Amino acid sequence: MITIQALGVSEGLVKANAFVLRQPALDVSKRAVTDVAAEQARVDDAIERAKQQIEQLMAAAGGEQAEILDAHLMMLDDPDFSDGMKDIIAAESVCAEYACKVNCENFQQMFRAMDDEYMQARAADIGDISDRVQRVLQKVDDDPLDGIDAPCIVVASDLTPSDTAKIGSKPVWGFITQIGGRTSHSAIMARSMGLPAAAGAGERARLIENGDAILLDGCSGAIVVNPDAATEEAFDRKKAQFDEQRRMLEQYRAQPGATADGHRVVIEGNIGTPADAMRVDEVGGEGIGLFRSEFLFMDRADLPGEQEQFEAYRQVAQTMTGRPVIIRTLDIGGDKEVPALALEKEQNPFLGYRAIRICLDREELFLTQLRALLRASAFGDIRIMFPMISSLEEVRSAKAMVEKAKEQLKNEGVAFNEAIKLGIMIEIPVAAICADILAKEVDFFSIGTNDLIQYSCAVDRINDKLAALYRPLHPGVLRLIKMAADAARENGIDCGVCGEMAGSRGMASVLCGLGVTHLSMSASSILAAKNDLAHHSYEDCVRLASSLLGGVSATENESQLV
């Protein structure tokens, strides 16, 4: 029996035999060529063939899978990607296979150097796209996944979007990957497909052989290989309890978020694409508390125009059928690269030229998005939220831009919601401290706890070495949240939380007690949050929050929630 501790990235418990995914080796050697033009033509042909393969996969995919594969198509259409290979061929007179390899490494290095965890994870997409082109160049068509014909748990170094798209039609019951984390596409897709998954299993995953019996706990990340009878019996009991808990949570699907004594807390979903809204709707989300609009701008060589943005925003509004949809304006910066913006590299991008700072500086970029948002507001309860706010002047400048966009649309006779609600993210400590001033200018707050914790604790949240210092229950963090919630209540506006803290186990009741009125989270956390609230009275929540506010350390506070 072998035990492996990985990171649980998609909840669920499953047992099945291992299917160890080993891709055929691709032989890439540096071979000199004399006909550079012919070699460059091979690149063009391989890219076209790769695009055809992806389009075939998209026809059978849906939701997030199709969105991710569509991003792959856009990368293949990006001249920088194809020209990078052809430039290497021209400069070094080398074969297309070698140029593809070097080009992939260059792009991956660029993504891995970014400070944003999501963008770092996109290096795997570059590898997937490049491998597909490489396989076409080498005429390697065999796919090991075609060999899956019985229920199994796939074990791999990593799973690409192409792999997971194909797995959707196979009897795969779970994933285990050596590398990756919660933001890797294999993890995202596992959650969207409802499959248990563990990532970051490391070198010990290499001990797993084809056909080995596997017990996989996607909640804790625990993996047991070839278990003994006692271990399997204990696992079966735990699985039965988990399955019963899931069935129990279904009762909250159609129920609004509320404490046991009826105190309302609206439970909404975070999304990155229009397709994500469907999953939020399926699990009983009461709206969209955060639509990260920047994902419309990423993984492409150009900027989305007004019509493209409008259609995406309208689609979400129509999916939510009258429920509120809060759309965050472009939150991009030195840490999230958008080639079309040509942003300069910064030494400290999290504190740099990003989000509202870019939008107020580049009026046409901002106006295009605001016009699209206003047009979409005619089709549902669209609300606009400005990120990275640190001053009253920024709020007033952003509101003035909204008025300018409104005036343009009026002159053009275009319909929109004149009374559209405007809000801000509270993610910089000074915004929380001055929340009483800012609350008089907006219709709602949404606390971005990911950055609020990072900034207030001076901890890089994607630095593994500092993970122990990133503490949501730090008394100082809780006091900042309470400041914002109190200011919102005193000024008669809503106060939500849209950071990861909102969907963390047991935190719904804590945030309710702090005075938060809306919680927005991943779709997979919505039912559990409703359950948490339903098992506490409002007085219980306030008592717990007061106790945590009075705590002397994060460690002491964490012990109260165990």
Image: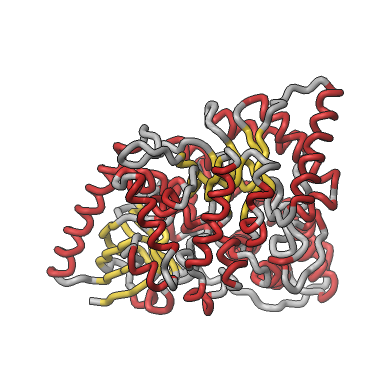
For the question of whether residue 464 can be seen, the reply is: yes
Snapshot quadrant of residue 399: top right
Q: Quadrant of the N terminus?
A: bottom left
Q: Is residue 506 left or right of residue 91?
A: left
Q: Nearer the viewer, residue 119 or 251?
A: 251
Q: Among all residues in the image, which is located at the extreme top?
A: 413
Q: Is residue 9 left or right of residue 308?
A: left
Q: Among all residues in the image, which is located at the extreme front?
A: 490
On the image, the x and y values in percent for residue 44 come to: 75, 55
Q: Nearer the viewer, residue 227 or 392?
A: 392
For the question of whether residue 73 can be seen, the reply is: no
On the image, the x and y values in percent for residue 75 come to: 69, 54
Name which residue lies at 48% across and 61% down: 182
Name which residue lies at 47% across and 76% down: 468
Vertical position of residue 275 compared to residue 464: above or below: above
Q: Quadrant of the C terminus?
A: bottom left
Name which residue lies at 70% across and 46% down: 329
Snapshot quadrant of residue 235: bottom left
On the image, the x and y values in percent for residue 100 come to: 70, 67
Q: Nearer the viewer, residue 415 or 105?
A: 415
Vertical position of residue 332 compared to residue 254: above or below: below
Snapshot quadrant of residue 43: bottom right
Q: Is residue 233 left or right of residue 111?
A: left
Name which residue lies at 84% across and 63% down: 37
